[in-house]
Image (tube, rainbow, N blue to C red):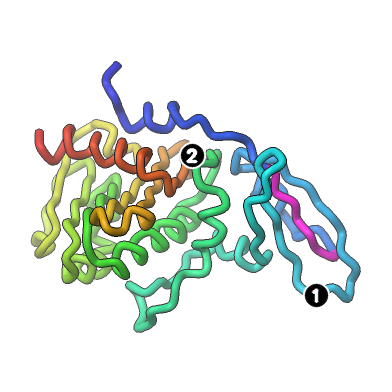
C-alpha cells in the first residue's frame, strides 16, 4: 500500500495511558479536554491547603512523569515561544508533550496545535541544524507565519514548507516551497524537525488531520523512527518528486 500522511496516523500503535489529576477541586472541563487524548483520566482530591495541583502520567505499571496543572492549561492557549519574543527560555509545554508523545488526540483546536507547533519550531531554532518540514494546509496560513519562518531561515536549518494552492506572495528567502492542488496537503497540519545526526534526541514531529468545525485529530512524537517515516514520505512525494 502506498504510504500517505493518513497511513502514518493509522499505523500509530499508541498504547493507552493513564492521566491522574491531583487537585483540591476538579478543574473545570479538564477531564473532558484530556479525554481528547487517547488516555484514561482519573481524579484524586488533595486537601484545600495543598496548593497548586499537578498531573501524573502512567503507561500500565510504568510511571512516566508529572507536570503542574498550569502546564496542562497552557496547551489550550497559544504560547509565545522564542521565535516570537526576545527570549531563550525553553517553552513550558515541552515536559507535557514528552509525557504524551505517541498518544493519539481526537479533537484539538487550531490554538492548541499552534502551541504544540511552537515547541517544535523553537526546538529547531535552538539547535539550528538539520531539516524542518512544516505543512500549512493553505497559503494564507503560511503568510500569517511568514516572520517566524524568515527567522528560522536565518539559521543553518534546511526549511521546507507545504500547502495546497498557489503561493502568490514573494518567496521566503532560504525556505523551499512545495505545493499541490486538491491533495493531502490541504487536509493535514504538520511540523517535523529532524536534526543532524549529532542530536538525534532532539527529533520531534506533529501530524494532525483537519476534521469538521476546524478541529484536528492526530499525534505528536519524539520517536526518531516515526519522525523519519514522516520526513521520508515528504521527501519522496514532494521534495524529490
Q: Secondary structure at mark 2?
A: strand
Examine the rendering and report whether any part of residue 8 can be seen. yes
The CA span between labels 2 and 1 is 34 Å
Q: Quadrant of residue 196?
A: bottom left
Name the spot of residue 4 as percent of width and height, x first.
Answer: 30, 28
- Residue that carries the numbered disc 2 in the rendered image: 217
Pointer 2: residues within 10 angstroms few (<14), some, or many (20+)? many
Q: Which residue is more in the foreground, 115 or 230?
A: 230
Q: Residue at x 46, y 69 (%)?
A: 91
Q: Which residue is more in the foreground, 7 or 95?
A: 95
Q: Residue at x 50, y 56 (%)?
A: 112
Name the spot of residue 114 as percent of width and height, x first.
Answer: 42, 58
Q: Secondary structure at mark 1?
A: loop
Name the spot of residue 137 as percent of width and height, x first.
Answer: 29, 45
Looking at the rendered structure, which numbered label has been put on residue 51?
1
Q: Earlier in the sequence, mark 2 or mark 1?
A: 1
Segment tinted magenta in the rendering: 18-24
Question: Residue furthest toward the top?
Answer: 1
Question: Residue furthest toward the bottom?
Answer: 86
- Figure quadrant of the N terminus: top left
Give above or below for 223 relative to 81. Answer: above
Amino acid at each position: 500500500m502506498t504510504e500517505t500522511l493518513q497511513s502514518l496516523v493509522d499505523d500509530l500503535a499508541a498504547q493507552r495511558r493513564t492521566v491522574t489529576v491531583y487537585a483540591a477541586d476538579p478543574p473545570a472541563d479538564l477531564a473532558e479536554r484530556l479525554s481528547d487524548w487517547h488516555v484514561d483520566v482519573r481524579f484524586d482530591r488533595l486537601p484545600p491547603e495543598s496548593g497548586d495541583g499537578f498531573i501524573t502520567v502512567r503507561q500500565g505499571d510504568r510511571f512516566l512523569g508529572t507536570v503542574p496543572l498550569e502546564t496542562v492549561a497552557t496547551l489550550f492557549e497559544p504560547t509565545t515561544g522564542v521565535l516570537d519574543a526576545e527570549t531563550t527560555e525553553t517553552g513550558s509545554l515541552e515536559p507535557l508533550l514528552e509525557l504524551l508523545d505517541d498518544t493519539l488526540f481526537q479533537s484539538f483546536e487550531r490554538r492548541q496545535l499552534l502551541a504544540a507547533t511552537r515547541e517544535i519550531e523553537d526546538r529547531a531554532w535552538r539547535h539550528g541544524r538539520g531539516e524542518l518540514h512544516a505543512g500549512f494546509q493553505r497559503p494564507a496560513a503560511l503568510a500569517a507565519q511568514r516572520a517566524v519562518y524568515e527567522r528560522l531561515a536565518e539559521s543553518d536549518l534546511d526549511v521546507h514548507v507545504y500547502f495546497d494552492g498557489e503561493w502568490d506572495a514573494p518567496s521566503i528567502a532560504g525556505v523551499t516551497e512545495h505545493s499541490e492542488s486538491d491533495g493531502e496537503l490541504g487536509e493535514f497540519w504538520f511540523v517535523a524537525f529532524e536534526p543532524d545526526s549529532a542530536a538525534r534526541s532532539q527529533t520531534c514531529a506533529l501530524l494532525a488531520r483537519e476534521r469538521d468545525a476546524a478541529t484536528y485529530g492526530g499525534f505528536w512524537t519524539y520517536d526518531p523512527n516515526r519522525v523519519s517515516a514522516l520526513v521520508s514520505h515528504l521527501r519522496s512525494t514532494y521534495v524529490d518528486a
